[in-house]
Amino acid sequence: MEGMVEENGTTGGAGTTDPLASASSSTPGSTPHVVTSIVQLTLPSQAPSAQVQSVIQPNQQSVIQTASNIQSVQIPKGNVILVSKPSSVIHTTQGTLQTLQIKPEPNTLVNTQGQSCSDESCGSGDESPKRKYREMLTRRPSYRKILNDLGGAEIADNRMGSRPGCETEVSLSPSLSFAPVIPAGTIQTDSGLHTLAVSGAAGGGAIVQYAANQDGQFYVPEDQTRKRELRLMKNREAARECRRKKKEYIKCLENRVAVLENQNKALIEELKTLKELYCQQKTE
DNA sequence: GAACCGGATCGTCAAATATA
DNA sequence: TATATTTGACGATCCGGTTC
């Protein structure tokens, strides 16, 4: 299929289902893009193809706007657009707005950034179910990125630490004690480091190196313990920050919904008024 | 008051992604 | 390419509400 496709559904890469994902790559206030009023779709089942004509004329500007600019997507030759009406939650007056999925050509893999690549460059060779499941999920852009694109950079950059009353205290424990992690006498070893696999509380595992002292007690070397502590502390902070950003992001979305609902109401009112005016003029 | 439930929050791990 | 950062997922814990 040639030409551009304009649709309010998802236009991202394989598996992308977040309607906001496209917002991250659009630039508010950028040059107006070309509107194609006729879109040809190849339907998956009965109807081999259908033409959809837009009610907006090519030289008219649409009054319906997304929060950011609508993304145009070039469909490479040989690709098929699947239309999944039943799953759509966005309703038009005559049904549901159709969602577009881009099916890659055979032997073409799409990575998590929506970029296609060859089998050799993409695959890791690991075919475990967990891996497959993870690969099905598409990682969204970072909340900071999304907020920046939505014009909320000041929110994204406003860290807890820079807010009055929200200072985060970061302190490193100067020296961590050498608590034996394995009861003495359970393992007889020579001197030197040994490796032990341990399972974490969250189901994950870790490889821990340990050493034995003269009394036969086993312990984790201080350097390693400290490194781990530091890593955990950093990640703890990062997780907090990430959750905070996620909350901001959701708040931002809710605000956008409210704004768009108001706009929608206003437009409906305007349309109603114009229709009445038109009818009045017609009868005169 | 004890038991149960559901939601919120947290720490951790692992993988994806960004950056030096 | 190595290292740092970000974030989804998971399990643990806490807390308030509800039921018995």
Image (cartoon, coloured by chain):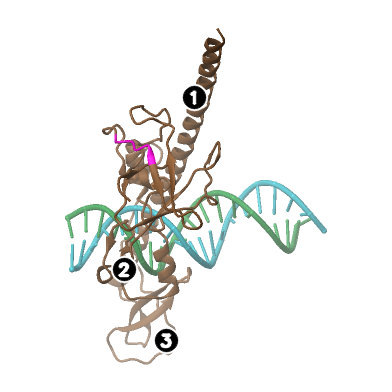
Chain colours: A brown, B green, C cyan
Q: Image point 29% across, 38% down: which residue?
A: A27
CA gap between label 2 and label 1 equals: 47 Å
> In the rendered structure, which disc, 1 or 3, sits on the residue that comes first in sequence?
3
Residue A63 seen from this side: yes
Considering only vertical position in the picture, is A244 above or below A181? above
Image coordinates for residue A60, horizontal then vertical, percent: 36, 27
The residue under label 2 is: A107
The secondary structure type at the circle numbered 2 is loop
Q: Image point 41% across, 42% down: which residue?
A: A7
Considering only vertical position in the picture, is A20 above or below A189? above
Residue type at mark 1 is: Leu
Q: Determine whether, in the image, residue A214 is placed left or right of residue A134.
A: left
In the rendered structure, which segment of residues is drawn in magenta?
A: A33-38
Question: Which chain contains the residue that carries disc 2?
Answer: A
Residue type at mark 2 is: Asn
Q: Nearer the viewer, mark 3 or mark 2?
A: 2
Q: Nearer the viewer, residue A40 or A161?
A: A40
Q: Nearer the viewer, residue A32 or A218?
A: A32
Which mark is on residue A267? 1
Residue A166 appears in which quarter of the rendering? Answer: top left
The residue under label 3 is: A184
Mark 3 Cα-neighbour bin, 10 Å: few <14, some 14–19, many ≥20: some
The secondary structure type at the circle numbered 1 is helix
Image coordinates for residue A122, horizontal then vertical, percent: 29, 67
Q: Image point 50% across, 29% down: which residue?
A: A264
Which mark is on residue A238? none
- Image quadrant holding the C terminus of chain A, namely top right
Looking at the image, the residue that sits furthest to the top is A284
Image coordinates for residue A55, horizontal then vertical, percent: 44, 32
Q: Main secondary structure of the magenta part?
A: loop
Cβ atoms at labels 2 and 1 below 8 Å apart = no
Residue A123 among magenta residues: no
